[in-house]
Image: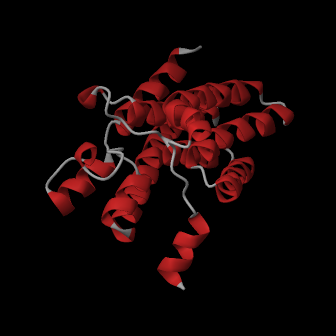
Amino acid sequence: MTMQKWICIGIGYLFGNFLTADLVARKYTGKSASETGRTGNPGMANIMESLGFVPGLMVLCGDILKTLAAVLVCGFLFRKDIGNVSRLYAGFGAVMGHNFPLWKIGKGGKGVTCTCAAVVFFAPVPGIIACLSGAAVVILTKYLCVGAVVIPAVFAVLTGAAGNREAAVLSLVLTAVMLNRHYSAIRGIKSGDTPKTDVLAAIHKKFI
């Protein structure tokens, strides 16, 4: 792998270290995200469940924006050298920074929003299809953890089918990362320890 790609991962990682959920949680509760909610996860789902729709939306937007910032910086610096794949490496770095931040060892997020943003910013059509596939799986199964793994897996299939082997391989790595972050929840499905999330019911309750 070229030095430019490693730099893109590094830049993305630095942006990913900014945990929006921590900032939002401290604003609303005076505590960190790890001390907030049922799971303590610094992500949209936990913040929205524990603090409400608006704080959750703030986390969603923040995580999308930090991934976009990494993508734009790397695209500006390296697009002429390595092409649009700089976006995907930057997005991958943002996911890693979000999941494994240097300043909060062991207390990172699960990277679902960053993963969605990374694949959409790299290749909008297959990225959106992958995200919709993950959403459909969550609606059908009511398990967020399953949908999280499906998103990069579907993206890997789509990019591989289109002949972009590099993107497919990196997407498979993202799939492995999602499996790692959601492994305990996936294992808990069989035993009933993993709670279900009825997304459609939540939307209906909020807006209808």
Q: Quadrant of the C terminus?
A: bottom right
Q: Residue at x 64, y 37 (%)?
A: 84
Query: Is residue 50 placed above or below 147 in the rendered structure?
Result: below
123 relative to 40 in the view: left or right? right
- Specify the color scheme: secondary structure
98 relative to 127 in the view: left or right? left
Q: Quadrant of the N terminus?
A: top right
Query: Is residue 51 placed above or below 64 in the rendered structure?
Result: below
Q: Residue furthest left?
A: 30
11 relative to 195 in the view: left or right? left
User: Where does the image place residue 26, in percent across and percent down from the top left?
Assistant: 18, 54
Q: Is residue 77 visible?
A: no
Q: Residue at x 66, y 59 (%)?
A: 139
Q: Residue at x 63, y 38 (%)?
A: 149
Q: Residue furthest front?
A: 191
In terms of depth relative to the viewer, which is nearer, 56 or 66?
56
Query: Is residue 46 placed above or below 85 in the rendered structure?
Result: below
User: Where does the image place residue 207, in percent across and percent down from the top left?
Assistant: 51, 82
User: Where does the image place residue 99, in percent across and percent down from the top left?
Assistant: 41, 33
User: Where does the image place residue 189, in percent across and percent down from the top left?
Assistant: 59, 40
Which image quadrant is residue 178 in? top right
Q: Is residue 143 visible?
A: yes
In terms of depth relative to the viewer, which is nearer, 190 or 8?
190
Which image quadrant is residue 136 in? bottom right
| Numbered marks: total | 0
